[in-house]
Amino acid sequence: MSTDTAALDNPVWAALTGPHAAFAEVSGLAARYVADASPFAALADPRDPLAWADLAELAGPGMPVWVTGLLTPPPDWETAAVIPGVQLDGRAVRAEAAPDAVVLGAADVPEMLELVELTKPGPFLERTVELGTYLGIRHDGRLVAMAGERMRPTGWSEISAVCTHPDHRGQGLAARLIRAVAAAVRERGDSPFLHAAADNTPAIALYEAMGFTLRRRPDFLGLRTPDKKP
């Protein structure tokens, strides 16, 4: 289980230059996930103007980009959205398998996208399911809850897409799936962590009750690259 938290300071970069390199598009000091897996991009060092220039080149002029961390974009980048967040360390979380959970794969993606559209847990695209283990719980054959792994910095795995159909909330399904995903992460020798919007206080209260602890408060920024100069 990882005890080095340095990778969590820049988790997208650490993932794309590590365990998720197969999903990466890289240009110099910038990288991004392939478009149908995740909208996130990253810089080797957000303080380096050359890294921002590489990201602008990678994305193209006037294009949307999502980044996360404690960073300030150059003045010629448009900031379209700012979502204050929290990053939670899950090393103290009790992990255990969920016998009623099923592994979700490509055939389940249409149902997964429907559940995400209904519950809005955060970005989930056609190939997000390939980024790690995704588990779900079905009721009468219908997918009613799920959780899985998104960013995978070396030694860590982000638990993500935690969502429950409104008709099935209050049954502890989210906590059961989080513990089960954490068990899969630990079995691989990694440690779980997660992100949440800072204003999602019910979810944060659940995570903290499970043993997650606050590590830092990154922002999630929706940016637009500079338009090409004439």
Image (cartoon, rainbow, N blue to C red):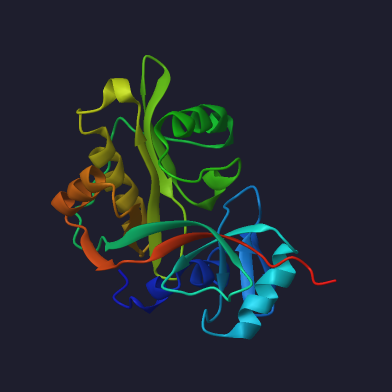
The residue located at (14%, 50%) in the rendering is 209
Above or below, comparing residue 59 to residue 173 in the picture: below
Image spot of residue 130 (x, y percent)? 56, 48
Above or below, comparing residue 18 to residue 124 in the picture: below
Please give left or right for residue 178 compared with residue 123 in the image.
left
Q: Quadrant of the N terminus?
A: bottom left
The residue located at (36%, 64%) in the rendering is 190
Above or below, comparing residue 35 to residue 20 in the picture: above
The quadrant in which residue 195 appears is bottom left
The quadrant in which residue 213 appears is bottom left
Res. 13 in view: yes
Q: Depth check: 195 or 97 in front?
A: 195
Q: Depth check: 121 or 155 in front?
A: 121
* Total residue callouts: 0
Q: In which quarter of the image is the C terminus?
A: bottom right
The residue located at (30%, 40%) in the rendering is 177
Above or below, comparing residue 28 to residue 155 in the picture: below
Image spot of residue 52 (x, y percent)? 62, 76
Image spot of residue 84 (x, y percent)? 36, 59
Please give left or right for residue 10 compared with residue 91 in the image.
right
Please give left or right for residue 9 compared with residue 212 in the image.
right
Res. 21 in view: no
The quadrant in which residue 25 appears is bottom right
